[in-house]
Amino acid sequence: MIEFEQVGHRYGDRVVLSGITLKLPERRVGFVGANGSGKSTLARTINGLVHPDTGRVLVDGLDPARDGRTVRRRVGFVFSNPDSQIVMPTAAEDVAFSLRRSGLSQKERRDRAVGLLSEFGLGGHADHPAHQLSGGQKQLLALCSMLVLDPAVLVCDEPTTLLDLRHKRQFAQRLEGLPQQIVLVTHDLELLAGFERVIVLDEGRVVADDEPGPAVRHYRRLLE
């Protein structure tokens, strides 16, 4: 359960979140809104990348601002640009790096990394330079580097922004099959098909909260 209790946040004098109160028990939740609406900032409070100025966030009863390390073991985060997450020379090393505090041996970490890469169609690229992978492959690698930790929640902040149509569909299919609770921030409204709930933000406030169809229609009216 993710909970927002009167969450507010500012960047300098600019209010980006104001009085957000939500409970998210659903398995698939989308955040949509225009640029600057606050959706990415709200998503980043879930694992403590952003700390609210007012109110609080709870993940299974834990506050990311106070229990950040524990919450980050429960919440994986995938950014729009995978290059910001890739830190090791090869794909297998990058995924194994996420397990560096797991207590597993080096061989066990590599075996687990290669196994997960294979599940996502990247087994043949395990020892390839990570930054030479295609955009879609990099995004799948970033996803693997989070999933290898077996988080309960996966937050994806506009993960398909840099992807072409084929890789976008591939990434969406991978998300669809995951057991984790997914919180997806996106401008790509097609990705929300099959989601249980979509929350629309405008100027830091929730202005719609519904099933995908009605929520997306409300969002489109905002853009008219």
Image (spheres, rainbow, N blue to C red):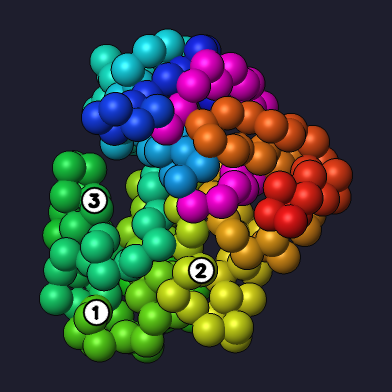
Kindly report the distance in space between the C-alpha atoms of the residues bearing marks 3 and 2.
25 Å
Dominant SS of magenta comes to strand
The answer to whether residue 32 is magenta is: yes
Q: In the image shown, does 195 or 215 lie closer to the viewer?
A: 215
Q: Is residue 60 above or below residue 133?
A: above
x 48%, y 78%: residue: 163
Q: Is residue 76 above or below residue 69?
A: below
- Whether residue 18 appears in magenta in the rendering, the answer is yes
> Along the polypeptide, which appears first: circle 1 or circle 3?
3
Sort mark 2 into few (<14), some (14-19) or many (20+) by Cα contacts within 10 Å. many
Which numbered disc, 1 or 3, marks the residue closer to the eye? Answer: 1
The residue segment tinted magenta is: 16-35
The residue that appears at 59% across and 60% down in the rendered structure is: 187
Residue 176 picture location, percent across and down: 66, 59
Q: Amino acid at mark 2?
A: Thr
Q: Which mark is residue 130?
A: 1
Q: Amino acid at mark 3?
A: Leu
Camera-nearest residue between 103 and 185: 185
Work out whether residue 179 or residue 1 is closer to the camera in this orientation and state it. 1
Does residue 26 appear in the picture of this structure?
Answer: no
Cα separation, mark 1 vs mark 3, equals 17 Å
- From this view, report whether residue 172 is shown above or below residue 25: below
